[in-house]
Amino acid sequence: MTRKVCAFVVLTFLALCDSGWSQASMSRMQELDQNIKMVYEQLSNDPKTMNQQLAILYFNKGVVAYEDLQSTSKAMAYVRKAISFDPQMHQAYEFLGDLQYLSQQMKQARASYLRAYQINRDPRLKQKMGQLKKEFTVEKDMKKYGSSRFIIRYANGDRDYEGYQIRQILDEAYRKVGRDFQFYPTNKITVLLYGKENYTQFKHGLQWSAGVYDGKIRLSEDATKSVQDLRALAYHEYTHALVQSLVGYAVPTWLHEGLAENQEAKIQKPDLSLLQQAKVQGQLIPVETLLRVSPGQLGSNAAIALYYQQSYSIIHYLTKKYGWSKVRKILLSMKSGKGFEQAMFDVLRLTPKTLEKKWVGSL
């Protein structure tokens, strides 16, 4: 029997995915500042062109502030500055809406998306507003609990968790998961704990999932029978959020899940029965296949469970053999633009075939 598992979902946020600035650093911010200075100096006699260029530059400063400097507040300020220079810049309104949405500022996000849609009638914006309306309807009655690192919303159901319990679990995950990765996100992360009926609306068709990270951490209260279950679920989904903050969208699904499963295993021992059975029967998923598929492509629940167990096992092997520091180097190499295979070879001198041979030999 397979247990419910967790998932990572990539949603399309305009500036975060399509900006082309995912490799930005402080030097990129300095370059943008220099360009802003040049625009003022060279285009002062052409106010219309100057304002358009300044809007683009401040928009990109907003992307850098969010992705690299981990500052939502600075990102919002820069994007608002962009809008002040070009009130018709629909990309800026949409990005501002994305930032407000991820920060659980739902009414403000709706206003930003609506303004973007008024300028640019993109069906995608209607979808975002529809998603936001659905979430707002469910979440407006949720309880709130204060936290310096998280935006916590929860609905009391059968388990009747208290806000302080959820915050303690999340703060613990922040410390302990962050210690392995040597990374501690500074942006607040929204965490939503749903009752049984409401969670099903937000798990993106992933019927097997008990939690999902899609820019927000969404947890199903119904999938937890105890505080320990909630801790395991929170560690798993928080790992997705951390990896997303550290690397961006460059991490393949199996790696995301393997990292998250290893952090979850700190709380609950993983079930590896399907992995052991597949090894005996010679039915392991080839590593080269694992690198390229998502669990939803595998069809059966048993195949999905094996995918998670193998992902866990491979990352467990890498961390035990080489240490978390090497895994972190692989992730940072991927952030610089390399694929997993190249990054792994650069750091560990392993190819998918040599990894498979060594990993299988360790089972």
Image: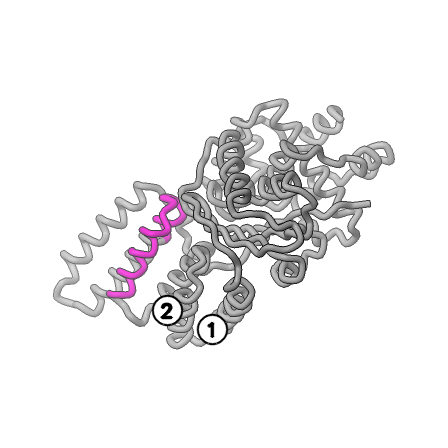
The residue under the point 16% across, 58% down is 40
Q: Is residue 226 magenta?
A: no
Question: Is residue 207 or residue 289 the one in the foreground?
Answer: 207
On the image, the x and y values in percent for residue 23 come to 41, 44
What residue sits right under mark 1 in the picture? 122
Instruction: Find residue 111 and report its horizontal and vertical position in percent.
Output: 39, 70
**In which image quadrant can residue 184 be found?**
top left
Residue under pointer 2: 90
Q: Position of residue 41 (x, y in %)?
A: 14, 56
SS label for mark 1: loop
Q: Is residue 333 visible?
A: no
Name which residue type carries label 1: Asp
List the single residue furthest toward the top: 321
Other-residue count near label 2 (Cα within 10 Å), few / some / many at <14 / 14–19 / ≥20: many
Q: Which residues are magenta?
A: 63-84
From the viewer's perspective, is 161 left or right of 356? left
Residue 284 to residue 101: above or below: above
Chief SS of the magenta region: helix
Q: Is residue 200 left or right of residue 98?
A: right
Label 2, label 1: how far apart the Cα atoms are = 10 Å
- First in sequence: mark 2 or mark 1? 2
Decide if residue 286 is on the left or right side of residue 264: right
User: Could you tell me if the residues under marks 2 and 1 are in contact, i.e. CB atoms within 8 Å?
Assistant: yes
**Can residue 172 be seen at all in this image of the molecule?**
yes
Amino acid type shown at disc 2: His
Whether residue 72 appears in magenta in the rendering, the answer is yes
Which of the image's four quarters has the N terminus?
Answer: top right
The location of residue 182, given as percent across then percent down, is: 47, 31
Other-residue count near label 1 (Cα within 10 Å), few / some / many at <14 / 14–19 / ≥20: few
Q: How many marks?
A: 2
Q: Is residue 209 above or below residue 264?
A: below
